[in-house]
Image (cartoon, rainbow, N blue to C red):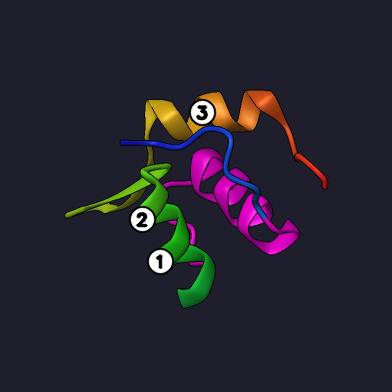
């Protein structure tokens, strides 16, 4: 289940934007693993894909503490 209130670091948010814009995007392992864990992206046979939760998280923008 996605946690939309989870804080994302700049690199994680930037990676999420990249995947949502380009299915063929390549992102670093750290942000990739965290975004998969949070349910914002998904691995498919054709590459990474942004989930509906990931799209909602992008719409919420970057949250800062």
Q: Secondary structure at mark 2?
A: helix
- Which region is colored magenta? 9-27
The answer to whether marks 3 and 1 mark residues whose Cβ atoms lie closer than 8 Å is no
Q: What is the number of the mark on residue 12?
A: none
Residue 56 is inside the magenta segment: no
Crowd tier of the residue under label 2, counting other residues whose Cα lies within 10 Å: few below 14, some 14–19, many 20 or above: some
The tag on residue 37 is 2
Q: Which residue bears the numbered disc 1?
A: 33
For this rendering, which residue is in front, 21 or 36?
Answer: 36
Residue 59 horizontal side relative to residue 41, left or right: right
Establish if 63 lies above or below 45: above
- Provide the major secondary structure of the magenta segment: helix
Please rate how many residues cluster around mark 1, counting C-alpha atoms within 10 Å: few if below 14, some from 14 to 19, many from 20. some
Toward the front, the furthest residue is 65
Tell me residue 12's x, y (percent).
Answer: 62, 58
Q: Nearer the viewer, residue 46 or 13?
A: 13
- Identify residue for label 3: 55
Q: Nearer the viewer, mark 3 or mark 1?
A: 1
């Amino acid at each position: 289940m996605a946690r939309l209130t989870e804080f994302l670091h700049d690199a994680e948010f930037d990676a999420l934007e990249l995947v949502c814009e380009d299915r063929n995007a390549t992102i670093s392992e750290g942000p990739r693993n965290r975004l998969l864990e949070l349910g914002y992206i998904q691995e498919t046979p054709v590459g990474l894909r942004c989930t509906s939760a990931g799209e909602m998280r992008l719409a919420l923008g970057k949250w800062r503490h």
